[in-house]
Each structure stands twice: as C-alpha cells, then as structure tokens.
Amino acid sequence: MKEKCNDCDGAGYTSVSKEKCPECKGSGKPRSVNLMSLSEKDMNSLLKGSAECEKCCGSGEIEVKEDCLSCKGAGYFYKCEMCGKPIDEPLDGKEVCRNCGEIHIVHQLDDSCDIAELEVGKLYHAKVNNVVDFGAFVNMNSNVRGLVHSSNIKDKLEVGDHIIVELNELRQDGKMDLIPKTVKEFRTVEVEKDIPIRKSSELKDLVGRLVKVEGEVIQVKQTGGPTIFIISDEEGLISAAAFEKAGERAYPEIDTDMIVKVTGDVNQRADRLQVEVRSMKHLTGEREKSVKARIDAALDKKAEPSETEFLVESEIMENLRPAMKNVARVIKKAVIRSRPILLRHHADADGMTAAVAIEKAILPMIQEINGADSEHYFYKRAPSKAPFYEMMDVTKDISFALEDSERHGQKLPLIVMVDNGSTDEDVPAMKYVELYGMDMVVVDHHHPHESVDKYLKAHVNPAHVGGDFGVTAGMLSAEVARMINPDVTDKIKHLPAVSAVGDRSEAPEAERYINLVSGYYPLEKLKKMALALDFEAYWLKFSSGKQIIDDILNLSGSSRHSKLVSLLCEQANEMIDEQLEACLPNVKSTELPNGAIMNVLDVENYAHKFTFPAPGKTSGEVHDRLCRKFEGKPVITIGYGPDFAVIRSRGVKMNIPQMVRELHDELVGAGVNGGGHLVVGSIKFVEGMRKEVLSRLAEKVGAVEVEEV
C-alpha cells in the first residue's frame, strides 16, 4: 500500500534553514538581464522595477533542504499489506515485507467492489458458480464474475468449490483471464470500494450513486421481499434494503444496537430514499467506539431540552428544573433514536393529563422521524388502575415489548411513568424491567422512597426539593413536555389546571395554573373536564381511549367537546348521587382524642360494587360531603373492604407511607402494604387480619397532630 509520507507531507524533503540567495546576494533582483530574450511582459516588469531573481523568486532567501529521513526523499513509502509495517519497496512486485513475503496475500472482494478494484498479478478468493466444457465460471463477489479456462484447470472443479485464482489479464471489455493457484500458506486481505463515508442528510443529492454510510442499527424488519435495516447516524435515519431471497432474512448476523458500515446504491422509493445494500459489516473495536461516540455526541446535542420559562411562578419547580430537564433529555433522545416509548400513567384526571401532555409533545416528533404511521410501532400509552406499577402491568408490558421486538425488529422501549413510580411498591416491577435491559424515567408526586432511584434513568418528584403532592404530576409533566417540544405550549397549557382541580390541589401553583386559563376555561368547566376524565377512566379500564380523552380535553378540534363533557358529567353525577344515597346513612363518625372527626364506611357491604364510582372514588366523594358537614374541623375518612382501606383526610398531619411501614412491622402475618401521598393513600392487607389492621390504623390516626382548618 503506497502512502504519502506524513513527516514531509509528500514533499520528499524537510527544510533545515534559510540562507542568503547566492544568485542575487539577497537583493531579490536579477543580477543581469538579457534584454534580447525578455518578453513584452517581462520588459514592462523590468521598466517598473518589479523584476525578480529567478532562483529565490524575489525573496532574497533560499531554503536549505535535506532528504526526508522517513521516506528517504521519495515523498511516499510503502506499507506491508499483511502486517502494516513500513517497507522500502515492493518485494518481487508485491507490497509485503520480507517476513510476510513467504505468506501469500489472497484478496477477498467485498460486495461493494467491481472490476475497478482488481489488479493484475494479485490472488483472489473465488467460488465456482458454473462448470462448462470450456472452463469454469467463478464469482469473486456478487458483482464480479470471471472464467477459468479449461486449459488452466488441472484438478476437477465442481459448483460450490472455493478456490484461489490469480488475475493473469484484465481486458478492456471487462473479461479476465484467471488461473487457479494452490497456496499452502496465505493471509486474506479484504478489499472494499474506496469511497467516502456519507451522512444521511447527503443522500438526497446522491440518488443513483454508490455510497458508504456508518451508523447504529435501530430496527430490523423482515418483509415478504427484502430485509429492511433502519440505521441511525448523527444526522438522521437511513433505510437500507438487503435482499437474499423473498422473505428470507439477509445478514442474520446483524441485529439492533450494532454499529455497522453499509455500502449500497441510493434509490428513490415512493416518497423515501432507500439504500440498496451491496455490503453490510458489523464494526468492532476502535472503529465501533469511534462511530458510536460520534453519533452519541451529535444526538446528545439534538436531545438537549429547550430552555423554556415555566408557565407559572413556582419555587418548587425551579428547584426541580435540573431533574425535569434530565427526564426531558432522556425522552427526547429516545424519540430521536427511534426507540419505542411506553407511557404508563395512573388512571385518573391527574395521571391522564400528565400522560397526554407528554404524548402531544412527542407524537409529532415520532411521526416526523419515522413516518406518518409510526405511532403504532413506536408509541403506546397505557393506564394503571393501581397507584403503583403492578406486577400484572409490568408483565404485560415486558411480554408485549419482547413480542414487538421479535416481530418488528425494534429496540426494547423506554418506559415513562407519570403519576406513579416513586414508592417502594414500584420496586418489584422496576427490578423486572431492569432484568430485561429496559430503561425507565418517572415524573410523580407521590411520596418517594429512596430505593427507587437506582432503577431509574431520571426521576422528578417535588418531595426531593422540599415540596409535596400539591404540585401535581400533570403540572410537572406539562412543563417537561414543553422542554421536549415547546411548540405544544398553547395546546396543553390548560392541562395542569385540569390536573390541579382533579387532584384537589391546594398548592399556590394550582391557583396560578387555573388563573392562567380562566379566560377560556372557567373553574367550573375545569371541574367538569376532570370529572369526565375520572368517569371515562373507570370504563376504559386498561385502554388508553386516545380519541375520547382528546375530545374531553378539547385537544382534537372536535365540536363534540362541550357536549361530551356535559353528557359524561351528567351520567357521572347521577351515579355518584345514587352511590352516596346508599353510603352516607351507613357512615359511622367518631370524634378522636386529637379532635379530628373519623368517618368509616364499609364499601364492601354498603356501596354498589362493580360500577362507578369505584371504592377509592366513593370514599373521596363521601369525604367531600363530610368535610362540608363538619366545616372547620379536621376530618379523616376511611373506606374499607375485605382486604383494603382507602384514606382521605383534611387538617391532619399524617404520613401514610410511614403508617404503612409501621403496620407492616407491628402486625406480623397481616401482609400490610400500600402508600400514596402523606395524607391521602390506600392500604392492603390479608382479609383475615382486617379487624386488627383497622383497629391499629384507627389508633395511629387518633394520635396524629391536627391543623387549624
């Protein structure tokens, strides 16, 4: 391999010093002039006094040069094709060193090569494709085919035989004379088409040309015809089609997350560019690291969150800004890299508004990057009935993710959890997610447990900066969504207000978000939207109900919005009134030693089952009525069933997660677990220990400090 000398940059010499020009004695002017030999131009220069000394070109100095020691004045040197060491000159016409000279070099043509890469006198690997009377046709790659004449064949050749041939002659018409060679010791050197690496953004100007690209495989799709590889480089996505046989996987050794080099022809397919693959290789070692680092650096820059101002003033959110930007960065990078997003949320008004805010931010980006129908492959939103990531939910998520990965060749998804994911009850599911190599981020306002952070890529929770559940998940997620995609601001800016009303937030931020949109969404309308969401969430169960939720939140541009919200609220209020008519007469109220009024209701026996409102919502509605009844007093409401209790409170300084931990330790065999916010939450236990659990819970509630209401 002939290469330019780096030490002298191909000049063949190095400059040692400068000295006075011996011809003009340093003047830069010619010492004598032959007027008869001067051209008209030179005569004009002489008359103007601008003639120059020919030896120093008018500088008055000349360089003192020495032959470059590295290349010995040649300006170039040879490298051994086998070991890469520098050599003085080819050995017997072969660019190898003496140590390697005894080992033959046999070249393997990459599928990107054509006859332009062939050199007479070199050895090549070939495969017998057809045997005829006058010789054997051999393939040196998928593009180069030659004939071994029968006069040169000594041993019988059969179709499929792998042989080594020497290129004896290459004629102008492309025909070649190949001679079989028997080589005992050899080393294979791969030959590739020497063309520059191109970026995805350049391909539109290279239609019909052969290109070489490098990037990370993010998806492998097997069609009824070719195998489609979606490759990401630092500037975008490249669709590469490789064909083996109809419906047969091409390059089965190539899978997602691999760094590859692809050579192929750029073609226009409908409205998209596609590289028709000639060659695809998995890069390893330093080259792999270099390409991956280059791509990661570019994508990190693209994924940087927008510098947005919050819609309202909030010291808590300002303190949370770094964590919020981190969540936004992880989500945005996953979208840019065409990694599927699984958005999990609690099935209530707060969880829905939180999830929908992020949904509206990322869907346009997903479609822009992956195509109009990509939402079905790269995004899924799923509600969770429990206020934590249940094993039933995570099992379904992992199962579906693995099936999609197998069916569509996708990466495993990034799980985005909103209005859920901060408690120790989430940890078993998080361990399951970690085992399968999936990443997870959380935006939540439930009281956090320190154990969850080691399973998360990023975590936003107001409790981390001294805040509480009053800053809702809907508020936080809307601001994260604006960091991801500021263009959605006008579309989603009412969602935090719906969230605040739905979660009964009394934080200063709640009032500010409500006032922000009061011109178009008065408080009463916000309350109706929140109730409609809760009502619809009950009937949707595990379905996202995307179009219906968009209509309720006035995000679809449909004229149905007002009529739908009114209809759902009418039905919800009728069912709530019917439920309360049955429940309220069966509530037992007691004044505790601390002055709080404790109300208990057996929702298993004194409430309608399997209908709206569910036990948690029923307990909340009962609590609201009793707060009005006992105006000015601290109120605690407990709705219980065979193996659970739902707690609602006003004016008491409870810490429900702490109570749950204490009950778990104190009542051996009760299986107590649960959690939620500090003053709103739920508890689960084994049915046989209900009496003991509820009695001990009442004791703890009676001992808490109360506030002035």
Image (spheres, grey):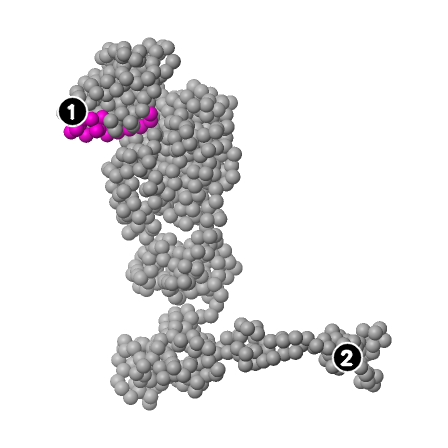
Front residue (pair 122, 449): 449
Image quarter of residue 554: top left
- Type of residue at label 2? Lys
Q: Residue at x 27, y 14 (%)?
A: 598
> How many marks on residues?
2
Q: Secondary structure at mark 2?
A: loop
Is 110 placed above or below 678 here? Answer: below
Image quarter of residue 671: top left
Q: Between marks 1 and 2, how big is the CA–CA gap?
A: 112 Å
Camera-nearest label, 1 or 2: 2
Front residue (pair 370, 296): 296
Is 419 placed above or below 215 here? Answer: above
Q: Is residue 682 magenta?
A: no
Q: Which portion, as a residue range, is magenta?
A: 663-678
Provide residue 672's location: percent of width, then percent of height: 21, 28
- Type of residue at label 1? Met
Q: Is residue 206 visible?
A: yes
Is 129 placed above or below 494 here? Answer: below
**Numbered label attached to residue 689:** 1
Q: Residue at x 73, y 77 (%)?
A: 20
**Numbered label attached to residue 25:** 2
